[in-house]
Image (spheres, coloured by chain):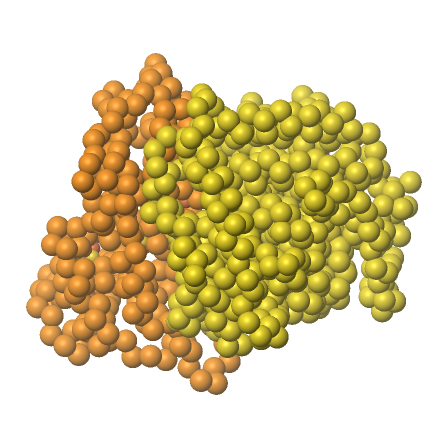
Chain colours: A orange, B yellow
Amino acid sequence: MAEQTKVKFLVFRGTEEDNTLKEYTIDFVEGMVVLDAMLEIQAKYASDLGIRCNCKAAKCGSCTAEVNGMPRLMCKTRLSSLPVDKPIVIRPLKAFPLIKDLVSDISWNYEVNRKITPFTPKEDCDWRIYQDDVDRVQEFRKCIECFLCQSTCHVLRTHDKKDSYFGPRFLVRLAGLIMHPLDSIDRTEHVKEQAGIEYCNITGCCSEVCPEKIKITDNAIIPLKERTVSRYYDPLISIFRYFFRKKK
Amino acid sequence: MSKYKTHEYDVLIIGSGGAGLRAAIAAKEKGAKTAIVCKCLLGKAHTVMAEGGIAAAMGSLDPDNWQTHFQNTMFGGKYVNDWRMTEIHSKESPDRVRELEQWGAVFDRTKDGKMLQRSFGGHTYRRLVHVGDRTGHEMIRALQDKVVSMGIDIYMEFMISHLLLDDGRIAGAFGFFKDTGKFVVFNSKSVILATGGMGKIWRITTNSWDNTADGISLAYFAGAELKDMEFVQFHPTGMVWPLGVKGLLVTEAVRGDGGLLTNNKGERFMEKYDPKLMELSTRDLVARAINQEVREGRGTEHGGVYLNISHKPSAYVKKKLPSMYDQFLEFADLDITKQPMEVGPTCHYMMGGVSVDPQTQMSTTDGLFAIGEIAAGLHGANRLGGNSLSDLIVFGRRAGSAAADYAKGMKSLPIIDQKEIDEHKDWLFSFFETKSDCPPSLVHTKLQDIMERDVGLIRDDEGLKKVLSDLDSLSQQYKNTYLEGNLQYNFGWHIAISLKFMLITAKIVSRASLERKESRGALYRKDFPKAEEEWGGKSVVIKNKDGNMSVSTVPIQPMPSNLEDYIKKEKEEWLNKQK
Ligand SMILES: Cc1cc2nc3c(=O)[nH]c(=O)nc-3n(C[C@H](O)[C@H](O)[C@H](O)COP(=O)(O)OP(=O)(O)OC[C@H]3O[C@@H](n4cnc5c(N)ncnc54)[C@H](O)[C@@H]3O)c2cc1C
Ligand code: SF4
Ligand code: SF4
Ligand code: FES
C-alpha cells in the first residue's frame, strides 16, 4: 500500500439507455476516500459528472454508490480499505431507477415515508422521558436516510416488491415510533398490511451495509415481527423464535 | 402566459435546513400557500451536520434564565449584536425546543426525565439540549416529518439561480431541477431565504458542499442590504489530518465534556490566553490561541494542537461523542478513547448576512425575508456554539408567520418580467458555449487559495487589498469557464453557477473586512489589533447600488436601560481590557 501512487477507477457514466464504464486514473493521497477520488475526477477529467455529495462527513447520506458491487457511502469508504491494485468499479445504486452517472432516482423512498403517520403524542403527558426508555429509539433515529439498506435488501433489489414492501429503512422508522414511550398510535396493522413486514425473511444483509451500524434486523424488524405475530400469524418468526430464543 | 412552467405561491421558502423547514410549518399554519425549494434532497441540508446542541435556557440542570443567555450571547458577539434579536432569541428558544420534542425529536435525558443540557464555550450554565453529537440531524428529522405530514409542497434538488423583482419588490424566483435541467418560475408574493452559509469559499471548512453563498448573492442582486459580512467564524477545532478530511469539525462538545487542549510541550496553553474559561473560552480566542501556538513552533506533526479526551472513561466517550469516536476511527485510524486528536482552525459560520427586521426577518427588499445562517444580527461579531440551532427555529417560525401575513396583505400576485428571465437563462447557457481550457473547479480552487491566504483568521489592509485585485482577475477568468455535457445532473454546471455567488460574496467579505478598522470578535486585523469603542456602535453595510458595491456604516440603535443593566458590568470590564 505504501508504494501505491496511482489508482485506477472504472466509473459508470451515462444514462439507462446509453452508458459505459469509463476508466480514470488519479494520484493516491494518504487518507483519501472514494468521494475525494470522484471529486478529483470531476474537477480534472469529467466536469459534467453526475454525483451527489453534501456533508462529506458521513452525516447526510447523499453520496451513495456501489463500490466494487457493495452499496457504500463514498465519503466513508477509504481507498486503503479497497484492493487498489485492481481498478475500482463505481456504479450507481442498483435498486433504484437511474438518472445519470452515479445519481439514482430515490424518490420512491420519499413516497413511502409519506405513508407513515408521524409521532402522535399521548394527550396530557408530562413529557418526562427516561433515558433507558429511549436508548433503542435513539438508535433508530440515527438513520441518515442513505437508503443503502433499501438498495441491498433482496426484496427490493432482486424482486422489486416496491409496491408491497416498505423496506428496512422504514421498518426502522416505524420501530422508532412504536417504541417511543409517548406515541399513542397502534401501528401493528400498518406494519403488517401496508409496510409488508412479512416480506422480510431476516437475512440481515441490510444491517451489514448500514453506515450508522443500526442493528436493523435484530433490534427493529424482529421485535416488530414479534408484535405482529402476537396478533397475526407469521410462520417465519415462529420458526425463528423456536430456534433462537430457546438457546438463551 | 409564461413559456416556462410557473408555480404560484404566497410564501416560497428557499432552503430545507432547520430554518427553512421551521418557517414552512409556521407559514402553512397561517393558511398560506407554501412551498419549499432546496438544491439538496429533503433531510440532507447542512443542518444535519450540527453536532453539539441547541442553546436554550430551559434550566433542566442549572438555575438558567433568558437574561443570562442574553448576557452570554451579547458578550460572545462583542456587543454589536442586534440586541432586539438577541432578546427575542433568549426568550423564545425554550418553547421552540419543546415543540421539537412534541414533533418527535428524542433528546438525551437527565436522571429525572428532563432534557439533558451540556456545557459549551461562552455559556454560563449547562444550556445545550442535545442527542449525543448528532443534534442537528435530530432537529431536521423532527421538522421534516412535521413538514411532510402537513402536506407542504417540496421541490427538492431544485436550484434557484435568480430572484425576480416587480418594481423593487419581490416577485418570485427562477431556477431548474438538477435531474432534468428543466426551468421553472416561482411566482410568489413573498420569498424567504434560508440558504445557509458560505463556507465553500474557503478550502478548509466544516461546511457542506451546498454552502456556496447562493443566498447572500441572490439577496445582494435583489437590492437587499447586507450587514456584518466581515465576521466569519473559524472554529478552533477541525481535523488537520488526513488531508482528505482536513477541516472536518471536531465538535466543541469534546471540550464541553472535558477534553483538554495541549501543545507539543504538553502545556495546557489556554492558561496563557484565557485562564478563567480555559478550553471553554469563546471560539475566536481559542482559534487564535491555537494559531499562535502552531506559528511559534509548538504545534503537532500535522500542524495542529492536541485535543485529548482519553482521560475520561471509554464508555463515557463513546456514549457522549459517538460520531467523533467513529469519525476518527474511520478517517484517521485513531481511537480517541486512547489517543489525543490533532486539531486546528477551520472556517465554520458566517455571523453576517442579510440585514433584517428583528421582529419579522424582512430584509430591506419588500417581501424578501432571510433566516438562519444567512440572516445577520443575532450573533454580532461572534456566535456562541448552540446559538445557531435555536436561531433557526426561533426566527424560522417568526419569518414564516410574518411572510404569510405579508402575503395576505397583497391583493394579487406580483408581475414577472419575462425579459429578465430570458436574459438570465441566456447566462445559464453561456457556459456551454465558451471555448477555453478553464473548468469551473479550477476557478473554485483559485478562489479558495486566495481566501485561505488573506481572508482567514488574521487579516490586514495589505492582504485584503491584494485579495480584491486577485478577485477581479479571477472574475475575468471565470467569464471564460467552459462546461462539458448538457443540463442533466451536471456537477460542473452547478459549481459554475455557484461561482458567480461565491466570487461576489468573497468580494463582499473582503470589502467589509477592509472597512472595519479594528479587531472585534471573529475579525482580527493585524494592523488594528484592538477593539475600538467607536466601532462598537456601528455596523458595516453593503448594498448593490446600480451595479456598484456600496460600502457604508450605520449606527446601532442604543439598548433600553433594562437590557443594558444585564450586560453593563461585563461590557465595561471587557472594554477596559482593550485599552
Ligand atoms: C459541522 C457543524 C456542526 C455544527 N454544530 C452546531 C451546533 O452544535 N449547534 C449549533 O447551534 N450550530 C451548529 N452548527 C451551525 C449550524 O449547523 C448552521 O449554522 C445551521 O445548520 C444553518 O442552518 P440553515 O437552516 O440556515 O441552513 P442550512 O442547513 O445550511 O440549509 C441551507 C439550505 O438551502 C439550500 N440552498 C442553498 N442554496 C440554494 C439554492 N441556490 N437553491 C435552492 N436551495 C438552496 C440547501 O440545499 C439547504 O437545503 C454547526 C455547523 C457545522 C458545519
Ligand atoms: S433482513 Fe429483511 S429487510 Fe434486511 S435485507 Fe434481509 S429481507 Fe431485507
Ligand atoms: S437504516 Fe442505515 S442503511 Fe438504512 S437508510 Fe438508515 S442509515 Fe442508511
Ligand atoms: S456526503 Fe454526506 S454522507 Fe457522504
Q: Position of residue B518 (x, y in %)?
A: 82, 38
Task: Please count the marks in the image.
Answer: 0
- Of B169 and B91, nearer the camera is B169
Q: In the rendered image, which quarter contains the N terminus of chain B?
A: bottom left
Q: Nearer the viewer, residue B172 or A162?
A: B172
Q: Vertical placement of B43 versus B190: above or below?
A: above
At horizontal 47% and vertical 59% (from top left) the residue drawn is B186
Looking at the rendering, which quadrant does residue B345 occupy? top right
Q: Does residue A107 appear anywhere in the picture?
A: yes
Q: Is residue B496 left or right of residue B271?
A: left
In the displayed structure, would residue B170 be above or below residue B348? below
Relative placement, left or right, of A47 versus A19 is: right
Viewed as shown, does residue B532 lie left or right of B60? right
Image coordinates for residue B164, horizontal then vertical, percent = 56, 55
Tell me residue B301's x, y (percent): 56, 23
The quarter of the image that holds ligand 2 is bottom left
Residue B49 visible at all: no
Q: Position of residue A238 (x, y in %)?
A: 11, 68
Residue situated furthest top in the rendering: A3
Q: Quadrant of residue B361?
A: bottom right
- State the residue in front, B226 or B166: B166
The residue drawn where x is 11% and y is 70% is A234
Which residue is nearer to you in this view: B119 or B331? Answer: B331
B568 lies above or below B212:
below
Task: Give the residue displayed 84% in from the left and 53% down from the top.
Answer: B555
Q: What's the residue at 47%, 82% (across, down)? A: A125
The quarter of the picture where the C terminus of chain B appears is top right
